Amino acid sequence: MSFAPSTRIRDRIAALRARFDPVGISALLVTHPANVFYLSNFRGTAGMLLVTAEDATLVVDARYATAAAALLEGSGGCPDLDLALVASSYEQTIVARVGQLDRSHGVHRLGIESAHMTVAQHQWFIDAFAGSTASLRPTSGLVEEGRSVKDPDELSILRDAGRRVSSVMAEALRGLRPGRSEREVAADIDRAIVRAGFDRPAFETIVAAGSNTALPHARPGSRVLESADLVLLDFGGSLDGYCVDLTRVASLGPADDDAREWHAAVRAAHAAALAVVRPGVAAGEVDTAARHAMAERGLAQAFTHGTGHGLGIEVHEAPRIGKRREPSDTLTEAPLRAGMVFTVEPGVYLPTRGGVRLEDDILVTETAYELLTNVPLDLHVV
């Protein structure tokens, strides 16, 4: 298992600190596990990171004390990070630490990750800071902004993961045959993901057969694959903490006219989306291009989700490749930048009949894009 070099961790924390003044905070309490990992290499399911203008403290409980200490002292750590152990609760430990820093460094405007703190935690901190000079300031996306553009170490992992997941997909397509259930096929794919060197599947593997392909996030069940079925495979793997995601469709025997029509429309939308990918283009324009191609083929209403999503530590992160949800939707208006990684995955879904989705992982380069996944887009006939 690899770790971001300590120099990368320092750079990430420095970039985060540069975002403090514009939002009026003097420190940030990082509570989202993916963000804690990005800034510290710590992979525990519980833990918080308190970042000020001068230092950063990783707060863990007794379950992670030994592992966290070894991490910070070893090759995967960062000597600039301090370690604090929870005495009674995470909240009380943070309040005590903020009180110390407020007296010594004037840390009195504590930013919180508003999307990653419970209402109960928020109220607890409000009550705890009542009567003190410290106050809470809600923030959004401060760490995620940095995560959206991958550094060379992250890109190396994602390229490797893209090659591996493509190999697993090719193997899975070859192995499809009538008589096996969706659940059995999914179990085989999950084992293949681990055999390919991934830490784990990135999400619950989707295997959908027949009319179940009309369900974008179908769960594998007891439905048995039959001759002439469409079969949709959507899966991914997590490698050294980074996720990839890939979808292809196969036909068990010759495909009917509907399946060929749907597949041709989705493939055209996939190509149209890729054609506009380059730095400076608004993320939403990629979605618009895919929808226009689908509309030209009379299937606009059957395309029921966004064209893509960012990939990285999480399988869904910035950027968001979708339609604007409201006039102030900055996520889809934000320009693409070199180093961003996201999926392109248009699909059509006709209830009770079937559906098709084609998904690849894309890296924005200085001039256009690079495909991280490499499996033919054909309607695979097995």
Image (tube, grey):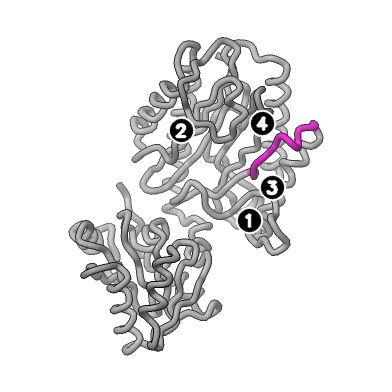
Q: Of tags 1 and 2, which is closer to the observer?
A: 2
Category of crowding for the residue at label 3, using alpha-carbon neighbours closer than 10 angstroms: few (below 14), some (14–19), many (at least 20): many
Which comes sooner in the sequence, label 2 or label 4? 2
Q: Mark 3 is on which residue type?
A: Val
| Residue that appears at 46% across and 70% down | 16
Q: From this viewpoint, is residue 281 visible?
A: no
Q: Which residue is mark 1?
A: 336
CA distance for labels 4 and 3? 20 Å
Which comes sooner in the sequence, label 3 or label 1? 3
Q: Mark 1 is on which residue type?
A: Leu
Identify the main secondary structure in magenta.
Answer: loop
CA distance for labels 1 and 2? 29 Å
CA distance for labels 2 and 3? 26 Å
CA distance for labels 3 and 1? 10 Å
- Asked if residue 271 lies left or right of residue 139, the reply is right
Q: Mark 4 is on which residue type?
A: Tyr
Category of crowding for the residue at label 2, using alpha-carbon neighbours closer than 10 angstroms: few (below 14), some (14–19), many (at least 20): many
Which comes sooner in the sequence, label 4 or label 3? 3
Q: Which residue is mark 2?
A: 205
Q: Mark 2 is on which residue type?
A: Thr
Q: Which residues are magenta?
A: 297-307
Q: Which residue is mark 3?
A: 286
Report if the CB atoms under discs 3 and 1 are less than 8 Å apart: yes
